[in-house]
Image (cartoon, rainbow, N blue to C red):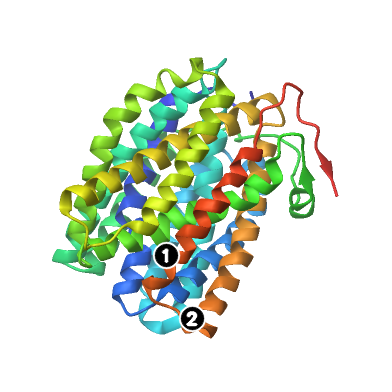
Amino acid sequence: MDHPRQPILFYQFLGSHSLLIGLLPFYLPVYLWQAGFNLAHVSLLIGVSGLSFCFALSLWQSLSRVWSLKKVLCLTFGLEFLLIICTLLIGYGTLAIIVIAIANGLYNGFFWTTQRALFLQLLGNNDTGKRYGNFQIFVTVFLKIGILIGGWLLDAGGLPWLLALSALAGMASSAWFYQKASNSPLHHHPTVSFKSALGYKDTHGSRPVFIADGFFLFLESHYWTLSLFMLANENFATLGFIVVVLAVVFAVLFYLIKNTIDSFAVSLVFRVSVFLYAISWLARALVSDEMATQTLMVVLLIVTFFSSFFRLAFNKRFFDIAQSGSGIGYLLIKSYQSQFFLGIGFTAMALVLWLLDSTTLSALFPVYCLAAVGSLVYLRYRKTPDALTARSV
């Protein structure tokens, strides 16, 4: 390992950022929607964020090799503060979307890459599913606390109060990690260039899966959040409550699975999770506020559980492959491929939505149906017994 295991520090870092994400980034798409922006603007936000994320990856590699861990951790909070400042520009139309997206991509790039690098260093022998499950439950707790507080603040005091609380929490966290984190660099791996990452192929089917995964992550975090916002009658507090109720019920089921997934037939579990994930997208397409309340909650629970079960199985496979191969290099390759192609794809989607004048949420029905079919691409992701045999093209 490049860095000593620091599980307590990892969970402190994870918890503080999960809380901050629940306060602000989670609400970005729905706040933009309520502020008068449309689906094309949200797609543009995703696209530019992805391209900015790619730039952040190059910067992260340079800094994490020479900066101490404490400086890298503090910088992630600094970038979150930059996102807060940029969000104040929300009244400046499309230009504001671009500026917010650039800041959002920089923050996401540093946070997610640092988090994945630290998590990889915690892994032992055949414990990926259990450890990922533990950290997913931990994330859920702090994320949902942030979502509850964020929804209440947006309804009670508006965006300024939410931004003020986010800034205070970020500054306090940064000061804490400056005192507690290590002075040694985070990693010493060779640089993974943008060009080599985009040309990467291996025997695991990583390339098509990585390209698709970025799209699915943002369909879940932005488009699906907008759908839930409509079901909540465009009420921030109600949206937060729905998300938290779903999370509590899901956590009970998830806890039962995460401790045993490492002992199941890995390939079978993964294939089943992919098919359940496809069903979750069909369920999303059918969700409507005309459903009976009991039926709607059952469908939402199915969506939440099937999606989360898939993410557990997928991340177990992903980190198992990363751990057996090039480690952090594999994480960087995934991020480059996922973020670049989603950046191009969602930017193009924004232009298409504008040209077709299809910027309302009615456009989500065909998107969710296509996602159900497209999600089967994950079946190409396999864990071969050989070490990574990558080549650039």
| Residue sitting at x 66%, y 32% | 382
Determine whether the residue tagged by mark 2 lies in a helix, strand or loop: helix
Disc 2 marks a residue whose amino acid type is: Leu
Q: Is residue 93 above or below residue 331?
A: below
Q: Which residue is mark 2?
A: 95
Closer to the camera in the image, 63 or 305: 305
Residue 199 picture location, percent across and down: 79, 50
**Would residue 63 be seen by someone viewing this image from the given angle?**
no
Dot 1 alpha-carbon crowd within 10 angstroms: few under 14, some 14 to 19, many 20 or more: some
Residue 236 picture location, percent across and down: 22, 62
Residue 251 picture location, percent across and down: 29, 33
Determine whether the residue tagged by mark 1 lies in a helix, strand or loop: helix
Tag of residue 365: 1
| Residue sitting at x 36%, y 46% | 303
Circles 1 and 2 in contact, beta carbons < 8 Å: no
- 376 to the left or right of 222: right
